[in-house]
Amino acid sequence: MTLKEFIKRCLAQNYESMVRSIDGLTQKELMWRPSTQSMSIGFLVWHYARVLDRWVHSRALETPQLWEQGWASRFDRLPPDPNDTGFAFTDEQLEGFDSPPASLLLAYAEVARKKAIEFLDGLDEYALENATVANPRGGRITLETMFQQLIWEFNQHGGQIAYIRGLQRGNENPRYSGGVLESAAEDAE
């Protein structure tokens, strides 16, 4: 498997896990926080999409983000600033975060993921390993390092989303192993 294929699979698995975790949640569950210093599921899904959109469009492509191309106006209660991804939100900002509906959050996240895949498909291995982007914390990093950072962040936040859902609804399907869902596996037998 190539590095590009590995990254694409990770992005798909992270997104599909997030979709499973928020499937069927009420608006109240999307906005629930385990403590005043915690993020909600709605916040984490929004943050996922914002981070992916910002890294791919602003940093890698150096083009306006999807957020600037109409998505911010759909999220009328959230910061329109294209640099605002929710990073380092204060407890007060987290308290004031009014989560949009799951359908809107997932629509934005899916478009951001598809654009990231399109970008990735246009790269060859040399560009992935050698092209650099500005790191918001200083210096420059390669595209492969950018995607490594995104995968790490999505794994971390995906675990938080699943954990918060578990606190509210119990464990996810215990037969899911990270690959094919049980219904597809049973159909194959």
Image: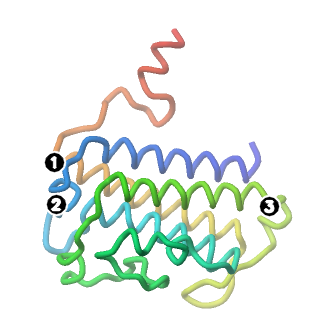
Mark 1 — residue? 168
Element marked by disc 3: loop
Q: Amino acid at mark 1?
A: Gln
Left or right: 48 in relation to 57:
left
Against 172, is 60 above or below? below
Left or right: 8 in relation to 95:
right
Q: Position of residue 174 (x, y in %)?
A: 31, 30
Among all residues in the image, which is located at the extreme bottom? 138
Mark 3 — residue? 123
Looking at the image, is mark 1 or mark 3 earlier in the sequence? 3
Q: Are marks 2 and 1 in contact (CB under 8 Å)?
A: yes
Q: CA distance from mark 1 to mark 3?
A: 41 Å
Mark 2 — residue? 32
Q: Amino acid at mark 3?
A: Leu
Write the residue at 62% across / 64% down.
147
Against 155, is 88 above or below? below
Q: Nearer the viewer, residue 177 or 20?
A: 20
Give neighbour class at mark 2: few <14, some 14-19, many 20+ (Cα, 10 Å). Answer: many
Left or right: 107 in relation to 130:
left
Against 42, is 24 above or below? above
